[in-house]
Image (tube, grey):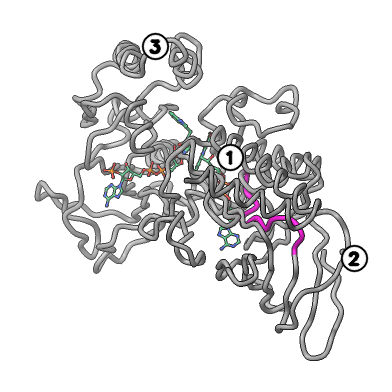
Amino acid sequence: MPTSQQDGGGERLFHGGAGDGDGDGAAVAAAARQVWVPGPVIVGAGPSGLATAACLKARGVPSLVLDKDATVAASWRERTYERLRLHLPRGFCELPLAPPFPPGTPPYPTRDQFVAYLDAYARAFAVEPRLGSRVRAASYDAAIGFWRVAAVDEAGGAGETEFLSRWLVVATGENAVAAWPAEGVGAYRGAVMHTSSYKRGDEFAGKKVLVVGCGNSGMEVSLDLCNNGAATSMVVRDKIHVLPREILGISTFGLSVFLLKWFPIKWVDALLLIFSRLILGNIEKYGLRRPKIGPLQIKCSTGKTPVLDIGALKKIKNGEIKVVPAIHCFTEDGVEFVNGCREDFDAVIFATGYKSNVPSWLKEEEFFSESDGFPRKAFPHSWRGKNGLYATGFTKRGLQGTSYDAAMIAADIARRWTKSLAGPTAAADADHHETYIAN
Ligand SMILES: Cc1cc2nc3c(=O)[nH]c(=O)nc-3n(C[C@H](O)[C@H](O)[C@H](O)COP(=O)(O)OP(=O)(O)OC[C@H]3O[C@@H](n4cnc5c(N)ncnc54)[C@H](O)[C@@H]3O)c2cc1C
Ligand SMILES: NC(=O)C1=CN([C@@H]2O[C@H](COP(=O)(O)OP(=O)(O)OC[C@H]3O[C@@H](n4cnc5c(N)ncnc54)[C@H](OP(=O)(O)O)[C@@H]3O)[C@@H](O)[C@H]2O)C=CC1
Ligand SMILES: O=C(O)C(=O)Cc1c[nH]c2ccccc12
């Protein structure tokens, strides 16, 4: 953690880098509380932030990781349900430079196993984020060539600190905040929650529950509710692709990655759909209409993930999970669907996805879009902006995208770091190079 020394009215601090112990360098300006960070500031201590810090560390670059929550990987620890497992095989979910999951880990690790993996990863690279530090605002100060990152101490004690750094890595994730339908729930009086708060189904035993949305969250939460004795309905308002998680004993994802090395995406999609039909049957008769475009093509062009079925489909087929159409409006005790039918529900669980929170704190609109909070450039160009701004974990490619970003960002910053140590002329050359590449 940083050292601090009182100097006149203001506090001047120096941060020695994550896990590097107390700092020993010069301080910067004399505002209320400012900390100069020699390496990059990374906002977010999820898989993306941890992987970037680890890759930087491996190249000898210190960094400061900030997270608003009290633990690393809080999205996984706090905002997922208990029975969640990774839906991609563990080999596709490992972070860079780390040994594989420990022996005995199942092919699809549980949430707790993944959290333990992330804890061990942070420990192995001695990444020690400054936790409970919520970034309220960040902006580039062109006059001094530094990012000003204002972070609030969530516990209240330390107030607000402004971190100053040459480099800012945005690692707050694609799933930073729950997305709710703009219409709200009107006069509805039952229980309402989002899947990010859903933990387990036992509190819903014997209740009538409506799950709104049929992505992987909607499907898996519906299955969990059903397994816990809730009478479950799931809103399917549009076309969706449901694929078996495995085909002929091979993970559908792994098989796709392999086939894509040899065949065009359209052929691979066609093959996936043939196998899905053979394994899952005709799912259209259960209200699950397939889009015309194939699942991988949709994933690539929009980022929308196909459902990888872990058992919900069986429950849909046997009627335990009831597929219902879009909601027209909420009533006091339930909903009216677009087909005019009304039904009462004890609880409504929104499985309506997530949003980036970047526009709420990053004062920059050239690289990040203010409308969706994602980099304007898509993978594989989404990792670097201008003036030392980087983004990791915004590729819509899961943890594999995270690993790619982390490696690219660390290599790029390490090159500039080395030049900055070599002196101002070399550092200016590095910046010139950045402009050249970016344009
Ligand atoms: C339920 C679920 C299951 C998934 N399963 C898989 C899978 O099996 N395989 C796969 O490859 N991908 C999967 N993904 C997609 C993706 O890999 C994960 O969402 C992953 O956690 C993304 O990591 P991240 O670090 O980018 O974001 P997060 O894990 O969300 O981390 C972001 C961090 O930023 C912090 N933060 C946010 N705002 C601020 C702020 N203003 N100041 C300070 N800190 C802030 C948050 O507290 C959080 O700790 C899944 C996603 C979800 C939602
Ligand atoms: N085991 C695992 O590894 C799991 C992984 N995940 C991953 O987490 C990420 C987020 O998934 P998820 O939370 O499912 O979010 P998604 O964004 O993937 O899905 C949201 C769903 O909600 C629907 N929806 C949105 N608004 C409404 C509305 N007003 N009425 C009805 N339906 C609505 C969408 O339908 P439409 O298409 O019509 O907009 C879509 O089907 C994904 O990457 C997913 O793969 C999630 C759960 C488990
Ligand atoms: O969980 C997710 O949504 C992911 O991003 C993982 C993922 C990346 N590419 C895919 C293709 C099909 C299914 C899941 C994924």
Magenta-drawn segment: 37-47
Q: Amino acid at mark 2?
A: Asp
Marking on residue 305? none
- Local SS, label 1: helix
Q: Residues within 10 Å of mark 1 (few under 14, many from 20)?
A: many
Q: CA distance from mark 2 to mark 1?
A: 31 Å
Mark 3 lies on residue: 263
Mark 2 lies on residue: 24
Labels 2 & 3 near each other (Cβ < 8 A): no
Q: Nearer the viewer, mark 2 or mark 3?
A: 2
Q: Residues within 10 Å of mark 3 (few under 14, many from 20)?
A: few
Q: Amino acid at mark 3?
A: Phe
Looking at the image, residue 124 lies above or below residue 332: above
Queried whether the magenta region covers residue 41, the answer comes back as yes
Q: CA distance from mark 2 to mark 3?
A: 56 Å
Task: Quadrant for the N terminus, please.
Answer: bottom right
Q: Position of residue 17 (x, y in %)?
A: 79, 57
Q: Residues within 10 Å of mark 2 (few under 14, many from 20)?
A: few
Q: In this view of the protein, which residue sits in the foreground, 157 or 413?
A: 413
Q: Position of residue 214 (x, y in %)?
A: 33, 40
Mark 1 lies on residue: 405
Query: Which residue is rendered at x = 73% and y = 55% of the image?
Result: 425
